[in-house]
Image (spheres, grey):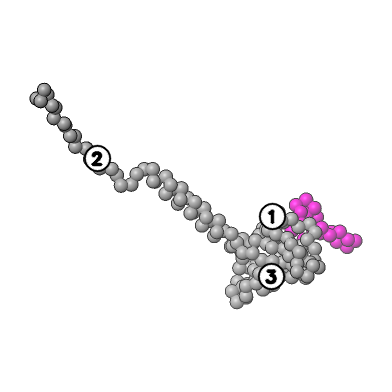
Amino acid sequence: MGNDIEKAVVYKPKLVEKNKLSFIWILPLIILGVLGWIAYESYAKKGTNITVVFKSAEGLKENITPLEYKGLQLGKVTKISMHEDLQSVKVNILVDNDVAKYVASESSEFWIKKPTVSLTKVSGLNTLISGYKIELSPKFKTQEEYNQGTFKNYFEGLDSRPN
């Protein structure tokens, strides 16, 4: 009986070299890179906020009413609220970054373009279809004037187009 004792066999483990960077980690890194790029793009294109105070917000709509100059959209109304004086309204406009230098300038004047019908003139009839717009009228005419001008982001809106 004593001879029937079997020897215990001990197996050594096989060691397999694994790659240090697994394929599983590549996908999250790609997703992180794409999200980072999207965040950068949205931040870079965010724009500049300006505030224009008008006597009335009649015809203006948040996230719809555009800021235009000669038919080119330069920004959009983002918020309309009461002014502190309770006699007028504050209109916040997000101006596209590529034109912010020209819009947020001391030379800018703003007014609400709406249809006008009188005995002597008819104007702004396209606003009946497309809605009211905020128009920009710059006083500066040259690039040099803009380079020497100062940044401004708070304006008093005009009642009508300046002459």
> The C terminus appears in which quarter of the rendering?
bottom right
Vertical relation: 38 (above or below) 139: above
Q: Position of residue 50 (x, y in %)?
A: 66, 66
Q: Which residues are magenta?
A: 113-133
Residue at 62% in and 72% down:
151
- The answer to which of 129 and 15 lies nearer the viewer is 15
Residue beneath label 3, please? 154
- Tell which circle, 2 or 1, labels the residue nearer the N-terminal end: 2
Asked if the residue at tag 1 contacts the one at tag 2, i.e. Cβ–Cβ closer than 8 Å, the answer is: no
Mark 2–mark 1 distance (CA, rounded to whole Å) = 60 Å
Residue beneath label 2, please? 16
Residue at 84% in and 60% down:
116
Residue 135 shown left or right of residue 22 in the figure? right
Residue at 62% in and 75% down:
150
Residue at the extreme top: 1
Vertical relation: 162 (above or below) 28: below
Residue beneath label 1, please? 63
Q: How many marks?
A: 3
Observer-side mark, 2 or 1, equals 2
Q: Secondary structure at mark 2?
A: loop
Mark 3–mark 2 distance (CA, rounded to whole Å) = 68 Å
Residue 119 shown left or right of residue 111 in the figure? right
Q: Position of residue 17 (x, y in %)?
A: 25, 42
One can see residue 161 in this view: no
* Disc 2 residue type (three-letter): Val
Residue 10 shown left or right of residue 53 in the figure? left
Residue at 42% in and 49% down:
29
- The answer to which of 98 and 76 lies nearer the viewer is 76
> The N terminus appears in which quarter of the rendering?
top left
Residue at the extreme right: 119
